[in-house]
Amino acid sequence: MSDDCDDLVTLGRVVGLFGVRGWVKVKSYTEPKANILKYSPWHLRREESIETVELAAGQRHGGAVIAQLAGCDQREDAAAWVGAEIAVCRAQMPDLPAGQHYWSDLIGLEVETLEGECLGRVHHMLETGANDVLVVRAPQSKTERLIPYVVGAVVIEVDLNRRLIRVDWPADF
């Protein structure tokens, strides 16, 4: 990873192979999906390692996104990247309007009710089509709560400085 990039934002994941010439299928978290192709280099994370790779080519293919990584010309080369997370330097990302956040900014934040009861921390996010969903894990438990990420109705406040999300959500739900 380059020295000037110590803050990465995850934009997708390599989910499979495409063809025999080293292309990969990509699950993009960007909107629209093909926006992931606007960023290069990609920082590919597998377990504890991160490798920086230039994007050689990419395009929409039906409802999916496919890409070819520089130096990856054969299917066997591409197979090494299946399962890797795709991240880019935060400095490459556009600033968001007030009240909007990147998913990666929400991961790990504590979630509490309006009454101050801790529900847990955001473990990950789900895209459902209707709205995004916070997957919140309770402390010292495997219990997960699925809380709709609906700003103003359910999500009342996101305070990145305090690492806190306040929700209008019943603690026993």
Image (cartoon, helix red, strand yellow):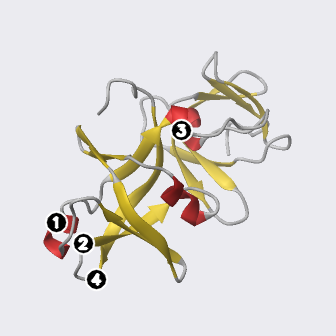
* Residue 66 position within the rendered picture, expressed as x and y whole percent measured from the top left: 41, 72
Any mark on residue 77, and which?
1
**Identity of the amino acid at label 1?**
Asp
Q: CA distance from mark 4 to mark 1?
A: 12 Å
Residue 79 quadrant: bottom left
- Residue 69 percent location from the top left of the image: 30, 61
Q: Residue at x 58, y 56 (%)?
A: 30
Q: Is residue 122 among what the camera can see?
A: no
Is 115 left or right of 120, judged from the image as shown?
A: right
Discs 2, 3 touching: Cβ within 8 Å? no
The residue positioned farthest toward the top in the image shown = 162
Q: CA distance from mark 2 to mark 3?
A: 26 Å
For this rendering, which residue is in front, 29 or 133? 29
**Relative image position of residue 119 (x, y in whole percent):** 60, 32
x then y, percent, for residue 26? 41, 66
**Residue 90, disc:** none
Pick the front one: 94 or 154: 94
Count residues near mark 2 (Cα–Cα under 10 Å), then give few for <14, some for 14-19, many for 20+: many
Residue 76: name its quadrant. Answer: bottom left
The residue lying at 53 percent from left, 38 percent from top is 92
Q: Evaluate whether residue 159 shows in this view.
A: yes
Residue reaching furthest right? Answer: 152
Q: Is residue 142 left or right of residue 100?
A: left
The amino acid pointed to by label 4 is: Gly
Discs 3/4, front? 3
Earlier residue among tags 4 and 1:
4
Question: Which residue bears the numbered disc 2?
Answer: 22
Label 4 sits on residue: 19
Instruction: Indicate whether 106 appears above or below 54.
Output: above
Query: Residue visible at 64% across and 16% down?
Result: 161
